[in-house]
Image: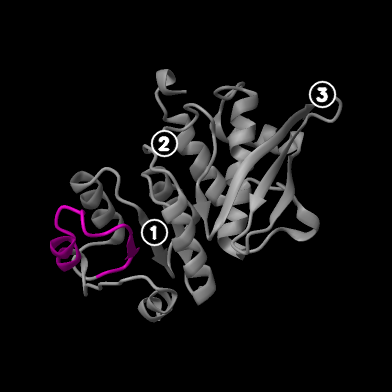
């Protein structure tokens, strides 16, 4: 389906049955502008092939697809430089839009959490950019508004709220009185919560509002990961 959809649009497409044969066909990367990987492949997982591709060609453009992945895996793949992580099943139009966006996207180095401007690339075709960040001293809430660029090409403004009681749950879970980077931490957590929602639902939250009401297992794993970052990287 993917090959037919892309060839119908005018792309030249080559395929491989597994990771090792795909890497052999890729060679030095000069003949290919983009690689689409499936996370579950014979021989090597998609993430392993992605790392091999980047060792061959640090500027390689990669789109990962899967029917079995988690938001944590999506974040890992994107942080290592993938252009998008598409959750199966997806439509031919979603694939074509993702490929088009990948070719238009400038190459960028893999991310380090909290280093520079915190902005995710794309997940399920959605791109997130922080618009506003407010820390309500009266209610103790962190309120962040994001511009979400949808695969269809239309932007939407989405508000994410982290109530004070959730902040206290995070501190209790991490057994700490303070969190790294203070306000920056809550902004990053709000983006993580929104990315998780877009990964699971592949659509915007109702009324473009997402309120974090609990410390979910995925957010706990995110907190665990952030708390292990060396202080000089934060």
List the residue tagged with mark 1.
Answer: 63
Magenta residues span: 20-41
215 part of magenta stretch: no
23 part of magenta stretch: yes
**Crowd class of label 1 (few under 14; some 14 to 19; many from 20; radius 10 Å):** many
Label 1, label 3: how many angstroms apart (C-alpha)? Answer: 41 Å
Q: Tell me if 181 is positioned left or right of 73 in this view.
A: right
Disc 2 secondary structure class = loop
Quarter of the image for residue 137 reads top right
Please tell me which of labels 3 and 2 falls first in the chain.
2
List the residue tagged with mark 3.
Answer: 137
Please tell me which of labels 1 and 3 falls first in the chain.
1
Please tell me which of labels 2 and 1 falls first in the chain.
1
- Residue 183, relative to residue 53: is it above or below? above
Residue drawn at (65%, 63%) of the image: 203
Disc 1 secondary structure class = strand
Q: Position of residue 15 (x, y in %)?
A: 25, 73
Residue drawn at (49%, 56%) of the image: 101
List the residue tagged with mark 2.
Answer: 111
**Residue at the top extreme?**
232
Q: Tell me if 41 is positioned left or right of 150 in this view.
A: left
């Amino acid at each position: 389906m993917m090959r037919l959809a892309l060839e119908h649009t005018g792309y030249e497409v080559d395929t491989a049955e597994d990771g090792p044969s795909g890497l052999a066909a890729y060679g030095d990367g000069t003949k290919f502008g983009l690689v689409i990987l499936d996370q579950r492949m014979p021989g090597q997982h998609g993430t392993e092939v992605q790392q091999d591709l980047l060792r061959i060609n640090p500027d390689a453009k990669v789109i990962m697809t899967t029917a079995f992945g988690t938001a944590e895996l999506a974040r890992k793949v994107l942080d290592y430089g993938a252009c998008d992580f598409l959750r199966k099943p997806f439509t031919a139009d979603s694939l074509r839009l993702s490929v088009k966006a990948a070719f238009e996207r400038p190459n960028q180095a893999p991310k380090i959490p909290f280093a520079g401007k915190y902005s995710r690339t794309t997940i399920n075709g959605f791109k997130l950019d922080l618009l506003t960040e407010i820390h309500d001293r009266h209610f103790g809430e962190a309120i962040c508004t994001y511009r979400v660029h949808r695969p269809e090409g239309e932007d939407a403004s989405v508000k994410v709220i982290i109530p004070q009681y959730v902040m206290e749950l995070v501190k209790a879970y991490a057994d700490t009185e303070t969190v790294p980077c203070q306000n920056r931490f809550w902004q990053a957590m709000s983006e993580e919560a929104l990315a998780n929602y877009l990964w699971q639902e592949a659509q915007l939250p109702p009324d473009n509002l997402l309120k974090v009401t609990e410390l979910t297992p995925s957010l706990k794993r995110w907190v665990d990961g952030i708390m292990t970052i060396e202080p000089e990287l934060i």
